[in-house]
Image (cartoon, rainbow, N blue to C red):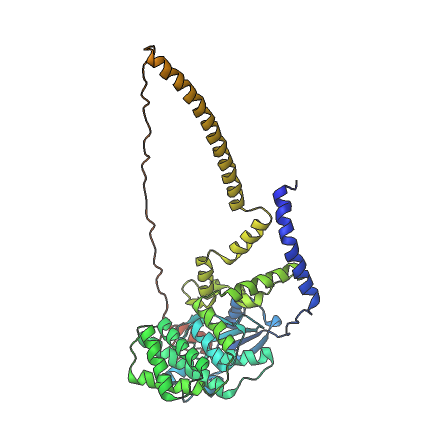
Amino acid sequence: MITPNIMKNFKKIVPIIMAAALTCTSFPMAVKADSSKVVTLGANLTAEQKTSMYQYFGTTADKVDTIEVTNADERKYMEGIASEAQIGTRTYSCAYVEPTTSGGIQVKVGNLTFVTSSMIASTLMTSGVENCNVVAASPIEVSGTGALTGIMMAYEKASGTTLNEEQKAAATEELVTTGELADSIGQKEATDLMNEVKQEVIKEGLTDEDDIKEAIDDAAKTYNITLTEDQMSKINSLMQNISQYDYDVKALQKTLENLEGKASESGFFSNLWSSIKGVFTGGGDEESDGGIINNTNDDVLGTDAVIDSTLEALDSDTKDEGGFWDKVVGFFKDIFGGSDDADDEDAEEEDADADEDADDESEESGDTEDTENDALDDETEDGSASDTVPTDNSADPAADETGADVTNQPDNSAADGSQTDDNPAADLAADGNAESDTVN
């Protein structure tokens, strides 16, 4: 049964639907570029470990292109930037890369102890990547310093583009510098500081050494971080290198918003429009919300695996704001009269009307009572009646307030500056001996 309220609210939505329909028919639909998904596997993995990584990524070898990454590939970018201990002698790090057309850079890492998802996302932007979803992991705990090499190789193959070699070297330098800084001040603090300085350098076009030093000083004060002269010098040198290249400031901002967990207003409406398109076209824009990251199987890496993702920050922000989809659902509920709030408002209006009727009855009763009292007063003058005293038996109810406990979540981030394999058994499986060589 269609109620008057539903009809009234339906009339409100009709213009919106018509406007959306006109928009869809007036402009040609954008065609998303066809790009493949690429997996990279460390050359020193056993056949069994390689199979487990496909399982972790949530795919199979026949559904993706696969590249084998060797220690020689990693050395191409890391020699002269990283130490021998950081470069290592074996390669176990793997990656799964999906280029996208929007959404910035989203990254998830598993079993990487030296680098985090935020570090990789930020350095990928330095390499020239603007939009993509990435999963970087290893079947055993490794440093992950070499993971960036495989990711860049996979992105180039998947997207069909070639990244600037100098920018790829700058990205590798940034990853190593941030990782070394993390050993001293913490992973989150190091990532926040580097992102703050990089954003200032790119947005303001800073190239002068003194101007960049001032930007570093300001960022250090913002995050209450004390840097040594050597750390200052390394960061300054890196930023002078990065300042030579042209970057899309909007793309930079989007990735930084991902890392900071900021669901911007433009992102809200972009996701809403993607969802509306999904209703009419049979699919959504899943790739801009993590894509392949949502298909990973963490159980494959074991219960003790070190896992973190840039999506976690956005999920936390969405929960703090009451939930993106809760807002969307509430919006349409309000339009079609299905929300609890609307029912509550109707109930409040009914109660208000009832109270008003009661007040009217009370006033009528009061008039009658006044007439009777006048008659009694007349009788009292004749001594035929006595006065009555009304009593007030009302009492105030007691109130009890309680507070809510706040549980702090532990910081499970880990940094492994030694870059050594913590699992000799994995080396034995890979090479047939129990050597404990450095791995990444």
Residue 381: image quadrant is: top left
Residue 17: image quadrant is: bottom right
Q: Position of residue 133 (x, y in %)?
A: 53, 71
Q: Is residue 333 above or below residue 125?
A: above
Q: Residue at x 29, y 84 (%)?
A: 229
Query: In screen coordinates, is 360 left or right of 224?
Result: right
Q: Quadrant of the N terminus?
A: top right
Residue 410: image quadrant is: bottom left
Q: Position of residue 420 (x, y in %)?
A: 37, 77
* Residue 348 at least partly seen: yes
Q: Nearer the viewer, residue 409 or 75?
A: 409
Q: Nearer the viewer, residue 124 or 440?
A: 124
Query: In screen coordinates, is 416 left or right of 365?
Result: left
Q: Quadrant of the C terminus?
A: bottom left
Q: Nearer the viewer, residue 181 or 332?
A: 332
How many numbered marks have been drawn onto this rendered protein structure? Answer: 0
Q: Is residue 440 above or below residue 22?
A: below
Q: Position of residue 358 (x, y in %)?
A: 47, 30
Q: Residue at x 54, y 73 (%)?
A: 132
Q: Nearer the viewer, residue 128 or 61?
A: 128
Q: Residue at x 33, y 73 (%)?
A: 222
Q: Position of residue 144 (x, y in %)?
A: 43, 76
* Residue 435 at least partly seen: no
Q: Residue at x 45, y 28 (%)?
A: 363
Q: Is residue 352 above or below residue 420?
A: above
